[in-house]
Amino acid sequence: MITRVHRRGSRVGGLLRYLWGPGKAEEHVNPHLVAAWDGAGSLADLEPEVTASGKRDVRALTALLEQPVRAGYRPPTKFVWHASMRLAPEDRHRSVSDTTWANMAVQMLTEVGVATTAADPGLRWIGMRHADDHVHIVATLVREDGRTNWLRNDYPRCVKATYNVARRYNLHRRVPPADRTAHRRPHPAEVSKARRAGRAQTPREELRRRVRTAVAAAGSQEEFFTRLREAGILVRLRRSSTDPRQITGYAVALPGARTAGGQPVYFGGGRLAPDMTLPKLRLRWGTPTPLPATTTVGRAERVDAMRQAAKVVTAAADDIRRDAHAAPGRAQATAVAAADLLTSLADTVEGDRRGPLHRAAEVFDRAARDLYGQIRKSTSRSQEMRATSRLVALMGRVSGDDDVIAALALVMDLARLADTLEQLRNVQQRLHQAEAARVAADALRLVAGGRQWAVTLPLTATSTPAPTVGGGRRTSRGR
């Protein structure tokens, strides 16, 4: 079930005539009331009468809904609030009675603050139905005592209330409230411009991926900026107005993405993702762990780095399970560091090509991110995992059978960690992130099972097909 909040208006009568009319495509069938505000009386008395012409006379109902507005103190210009509750396609086979629809609407409106009791007379509203799968709600935003109820943040409140109603009535489709962990979507103008330029991604999306890769492989802001420049990204630093030696922020641009005047299009870190501002990156890096001095990087060193990373991932999954209730902040810091490790692994395996590991890393990053772009203080485990992420990035591209086997084993361990992260997010009721963790785990298992590995790794001509680690089928995830 979903609830849609429509644009506010100033004409109650016009909206009611539309709802009781035939609709734009004759889709309004059997319009009738199913609920109304407390104290409204009988629904039959409120129901608009059918005139001789066959149309509904909504004047009496309009007058009742507008009465508090006319008597209110400085009522708003747009005082008509309109919303609709609709069942998802997989729930439309149910036969929902008018009484059930009325109860669901009242529960949603009560949680939002529209419906009240006779002891606290609030807004006047009605719920009407003219189809099996949805109801419309019309309310006037002036209370019985003359005060205006502005219903601020009404849409997120409606989404949360509708989700609670869907859970109570055991509906299949339940849309959880937003948690502000998703990436900022590119503007439609950016998408159109990228399509005209023949780009597979918008500059914002490509920069987000490249910056996230540099973040995962860096341990300080100096190393971070160096990696960005080495990757061919234009970097513009923002310095303090009181101390020019202090860097307070940064912006990045792709050399080929320019305005009509030929100027680079820069994006600040916060415009790429909520946790990519420079102060948050500094807190995320913490005190970097020195990497071991490596004079040569060969196949043996890469295999050793992958095996060391697998051990750290296994220990991190145990930490998340242990800290889920006692120390959620520690579990959060570990999850973010695990996302960095997966990002470094994807870059090591696939390079600049956006393959299945890169896509899994993007989804895992969504699952690991904290609410509202917060950054938790680093822990010993997260620092160890971040050092491992930098080590994997330092080892370079995998190229042989031994590398493949070690990388496959690491991917399988990361899939198990994604299972643990899904359990954590379900416990925290952060269901968007739980779904992202599940999708990431499924994608990682496909790669570890060898189903997508053949198009991911640049195997040598003498290499044998990559072996299957953990079996080709998806294993039980202990749910």
Image (cartoon, rainbow, N blue to C red):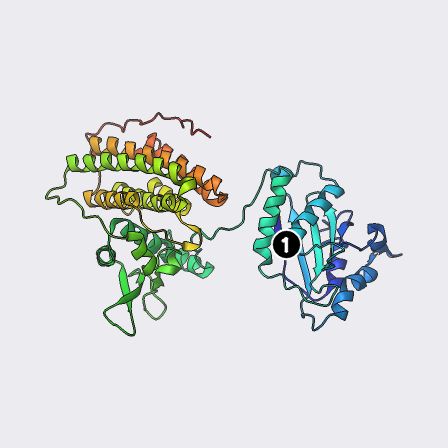
Q: Is residue 373 left or right of residue 386?
A: right
Residue position for label 1: 112
Secondary structure beneath disc 1?
helix
Q: Is residue 258 left or right of residue 119?
A: left
Q: Give me the residue at 30% from left, 66% from top.
A: 248
From the viewer's side, name the closer residue of 314 and 154: 314
Residue 179: x %, y % from top left:
48, 51
Farthest residue in the right direction?
Answer: 52
From the viewer's side, name the closer residue of 3 and 319: 319
Against 223, is 238 above or below?
Answer: below
Q: Is residue 314 left or right of residue 43?
A: left
Q: Give me the residue at 63% from left, 58% from top.
A: 6
Count the marks.
1
Residue 52: x %, y % from top left:
89, 56
Three-letter code, disc 1: Val
From the viewer's side, name the closer residue of 180 and 404: 180
From the viewer's side, name the closer residue of 28 and 425: 425
Residue 465: x %, y % from top left:
26, 28
